[in-house]
Image (tube, rainbow, N blue to C red):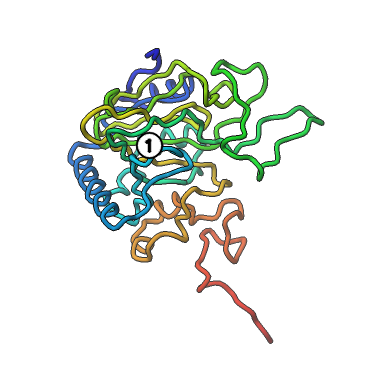
Amino acid sequence: MKEDGPVPQRDIAGLKESVTRHGFGMYLDAVDSETTAAIRERVLEQAAAERQVNLHTTNSAVEPEDDINQWVVFLPNKGRIFRHLINNSPCLDIVRFILGREAILSEFSAHITWPGNREMPLHIDQWFMPHPVEPGEDYPRPSDITRSRQRCGEPRPATGPVNPPVVCNVMFAITDFTLENGATRLVPESHRSGCHPDPAGHYASVHAEVPAGSFVVWEGRTWHAASLNTGTGPRIGITTYWSAPFLRQLLNFPYGLRPEVATDLTDHERGLMGFRVWSTYGTSDDFESEWARPGSENTGPLSR
């Protein structure tokens, strides 16, 4: 594999430059060592308990042939400590650089890459976006798009218009990310191609090797995947996946949060998780309301 891409950064300006040029970047020392260790302990404890009670912990949408790796899903319900990550200033800074100030959290889960796993296929995160078409040209129907029916090509800059990013992913390294334990691999400048990787193709990629407490960020058009873990211990990454406010969230936070967790959220966190109405989208009863309300608080049938 060709190892030619961005270098890890400690300043936001350098990180923004990396993401703009390469489609991804790495940021060091995002989370202090004590908090990182506490998060790691909580993830492993939860993961062991979920396997003990036979919870479904795989993700066939992105790892269709893998039954080794484990996902600990919907982290806000599984420990208050995880919320440190979505309040992380460098994380929010780079998300807002890519998507704008009103971006919302779409996914918040831990991905544990265990030894003996299968290699994840390269893919892009905004697979659901219709590709641009010329005026009068037939277009892909948005609700008919699938992960497997895509326009594939090479990771070279397109000669015509490409979609902008509407999602991005900030993955926190809760253990060291190394070549041996399956560090995320990414294809530099693939975000400019307007294409998806061919499942049968072979592409030069960069492995995001960073120490625990760092994060790796890539925008929604960048080709990427988890790699083979040939080591002796797990690689733990926590994905905070962000989207434009008009997109449906991958995790339904307003519906799926446990009541005691929803009550404990700050207004800032509630806004990030999609409780705030955006230009009337997401309202539950009143177009002028700033916040969506639960059904029990909304107006029902009335009579005079």
Label 1: state its secondary structure.
helix
- Judge whether 217 appears above or below 56 on screen: above
Residue located 51% across and 60% down the image = 291
Spot the residue most to the bottom: 304
Give residue 265's quadrant in the image: bottom left
Q: Position of residue 133 (x, y in %)?
A: 73, 29
Give residue 211's quadrant in the image: top left
**Crowdedness of circle 1 by 10 Å Cα count: few (<14), some, many (20+)?**
many
Is 222 on the left or on the right of 115, as rendered? right
Q: Amino acid at mark 1?
A: Cys
**Closer to the camera in the image, 119 or 245:** 119
Residue located 21% across and 42% down the image = 35
Quadrant for the C terminus in the image = bottom right
**Closer to the camera in the image, 44 or 173:** 44
- Judge whether 31 appears above or below 195 on screen: below
Is 65 on the left or on the right of 81, as rendered? right
Residue located 34% across and 48% down the image = 72
**Closer to the camera in the image, 15 or 149:** 149
Is 79 on the left or on the right of 168, as rendered? left
Q: Position of residue 126 (x, y in %)?
A: 54, 36
Q: Position of residue 117 (x, y in %)?
A: 33, 34
Quadrant for the N terminus in the image = top left
Question: Which residue position holds label 1?
Answer: 91
Tag count in the figure?
1
Q: Position of residue 203 (x, y in %)?
A: 47, 17
Residue located 37% across and 42% down the image = 67
